[in-house]
Image (cartoon, helix red, strand yellow):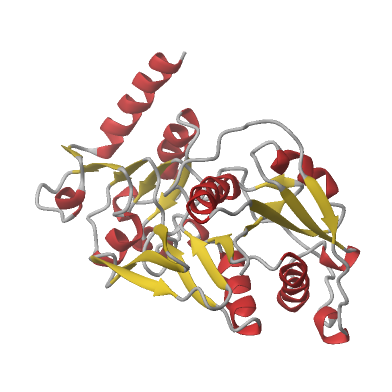
Amino acid sequence: MASNILVYVEHRGAKILPATFQLIHLAQQLATSIGGDVEACIVGSNVGSLADEVAKYGVKKTYIADNPELENYRAMAQTQALAAVIDAAQPKLVLMPTTALGRDLASRIGARKRAAMMIDCTEAAYQGDDLVITTTLYCGKIFGKFKLTGSRLQVVTIRSNVFPAAAETGGSAETVAVDVALRPQDTRMKFKELAGTSSGVKDVTEGEIVVSGGRAMKSEENFKIIYELAETLDGAVGASRAACDAGYQPHTRQVGLTGKVVTPALYIACGIDGAIQHLAGMRGSKVIVAINTKQEAPIFKVANYGCVADLFVMVPLITQEFKKLLA
């Protein structure tokens, strides 16, 4: 039975997402325990150059599905391409990041291949041929362990920033071109225009440091102090649902059960009381700092460090001190 682990390389604008290198780290651990190799899968158009970058991190073989029709993400086309790679590689496990794309594609490929599948996992380890994974349940209040049978393909998405990035080892990897036979229904949707909405600030799921603001920010204009602190720390900007609903920030920055789940090394909550759906989206952070004028706010129950203070005074002071330290 196959024992190799296939890592799906997610990329945007010819740049590999940091979560991919975290997946490689986990794949190396798992491959060592079952005596397999780590392989990679790159799907897209003109993506051959990304194979060299992936090879630096100890990947033994890279499968490339390169087709002009795969330049932009289309669910049917990407599913067909990934299925073709899986047929060629015959892996035991496929690892994907828990992103919007990863969730969509993993579910589709899981159904297509009748795989044992789980979304948004925080731990993974082999017991014999079976993969035991951990995920959060009930708004993050408890952890659940599940066993994915080794008798069929396993497909798992991993939450970002739970594992460190793989160390760069140098070297090269064998590359294998995979022909993708796209069907008419795979390319039925056509792109007329692709408009980006990014402001240049990191997505909250990708930042090792996230600075979030809540309803207490009072306006979009006031979020500039959040952006300044995040920029100083090379972090991402997040917001509570209340702040997003009020129009202070776009919903793409919403942290919470109905937004995005984040697990950064440092989470700074500014003016966020800590509604249960927000806590479910950030309680997995390694270190949580809360700044709030309400001493009884629920956020202080999960925070490692709490500061009962006016955020409009405290946040600029923290930014100033970090700038001194990082100068």
- The residue under the point 67% across, 53% down is 39
Q: Quadrant of residue 145?
A: bottom left
- The residue under the point 41% across, 43% down is 210
Q: Quadrant of the N terminus?
A: bottom right
- The residue under the point 49% across, 43% down is 207
- State whether residue 194 is above or below residue 49: below
Q: Residue furthest bottom?
A: 185
- State whether residue 130 is above or below residue 228: below
Q: Quadrant of residue 176?
A: bottom right
Q: Nearer the viewer, residue 106 or 7?
A: 7
- The residue under the point 78% across, 72% down is 84
Q: Is residue 259 visible?
A: no
Left or right: residue 44 compared with residue 90: right
Q: Position of residue 170 (x, y in %)?
A: 69, 31
Q: Is residue 211 visible?
A: yes
Q: Position of residue 154 (x, y in %)?
A: 54, 71
Q: Position of residue 42 (x, y in %)?
A: 75, 56
Left or right: residue 251 compared with residue 39: left
Q: Quadrant of residue 94?
A: bottom right
Left or right: residue 107 compared with residue 10: left
Left or right: residue 132 compared with residue 22: left
Q: Position of residue 115 (x, y in %)?
A: 57, 79
- State whether residue 168 is above or below residue 132: above
